[in-house]
Amino acid sequence: MPKRAIVTGGAGFIGSHLTDALIDNGWEVIVIDDLSTGLRKNVNRRATLKIADIRTSSASQIVQKIRPQILFHLAAQTMISVSIKDPLKDAETNIHATLRLLDAAASVKVDQCIFAGTGGALSSERTTLPTNEAHAALPITPYAIAKLASEYYGAFYRASRKLSFTSLRFANVYGPRQNPHGESGVVAIFISQMLKGLTSTIHGDGRQTRDFIYIDDIVHALLAIIGKPKLLGPYNVGTGIETSILSLHCTLMRLTGSKKQPKYVPMIHGTAIRSALDASLFTHDTGWKWEVEIVEGLKRTV
């Protein structure tokens, strides 16, 4: 039997890199993407692209027809401001669509369902850093609430429908192919602005911190969970290191040769001041370790 995987959001940033790695490791990959934010050019030529909206039955029907060994569910509505402005729209993509896919996966007995959760968005002012999985999740935006809710639904399907479900809570992922037109990919946004000679925008005073992890380390984490259906999670996947937005901006100015100082605007409501993830549990259970230092990762991305 061929090794067959479905990657939702496979035309996007993380999904396209994962697709490349799976194909290099001998997998047959079917990408489900509606191309609303993902790009057709990101999809590996050896992958099969199915253009479908995960909010509709067409995506779940693809899962039922293909009957993959693994379903990687990476497609999502990722913008916090959108989730705050329209919580219903966010829930339709990040909760209802996930439920459709979980139900389809359970119905055809998919071996593993691996879900792209969030780590940093579950932080708040009361969070201890670096945060481990035992720390109480404190979501304060509809986006974070939906991601956490999906983990609970996954646990339900694991317990009642025998679906192997594991959530990986990512830190702030960056690297080539990241969308510079949204609000969540600050590295891509800064680089794009600097290379165009534009003035960058920093929300808040720039002292807020994030745990930045390079795309290759995230892909290795996703590959590390394959064949381990008994690992329940959720697992943090990050470096545990805080980097301020100001420090990030200064490093990127040096790497791009930009001379323009940033302008400052108010912070987006609901974003954490500080964030860093303790991934020691995932390292213990899988042997995974992050490898790419931030300056090296930023050089590659530029």
Image (cartoon, rainbow, N blue to C red):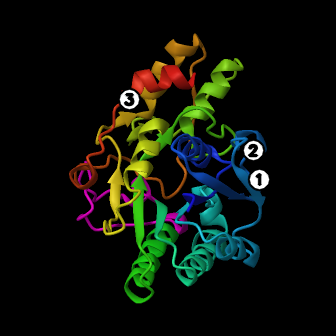
Cα distance in 3D space between marks 2 and 3 = 26 Å
Where is mark 1, residue-wise? 35
Query: In the displayed structure, would residue 105 be above or below residue 48?
Result: below
Where is mark 3, residue-wise? 292
Cα distance in 3D space between marks 1 and 2 = 6 Å
Q: Does the magenta stretch include residue 10?
A: no
Where is mark 2, residue-wise? 39
Q: Do the residues labelled 1 and 2 touch (CB within 8 Å)?
A: yes
| Rendering coords of residue 50 (x, y %) | 76, 59
The amino acid type, in three-letter code, at marker 2 is: Leu
Identity of the residue drawn at 60% across and 65% down: 84
* Mark 2 secondary-structure assignment: loop
| Rendering coords of residue 129 (x, y %) | 25, 49
Region rendered in magenta: 117-144
Q: Does the magenta stretch include residue 119?
A: yes
Badge 3 local density, few (<14 within 10 Å), some, or many (20+)? some
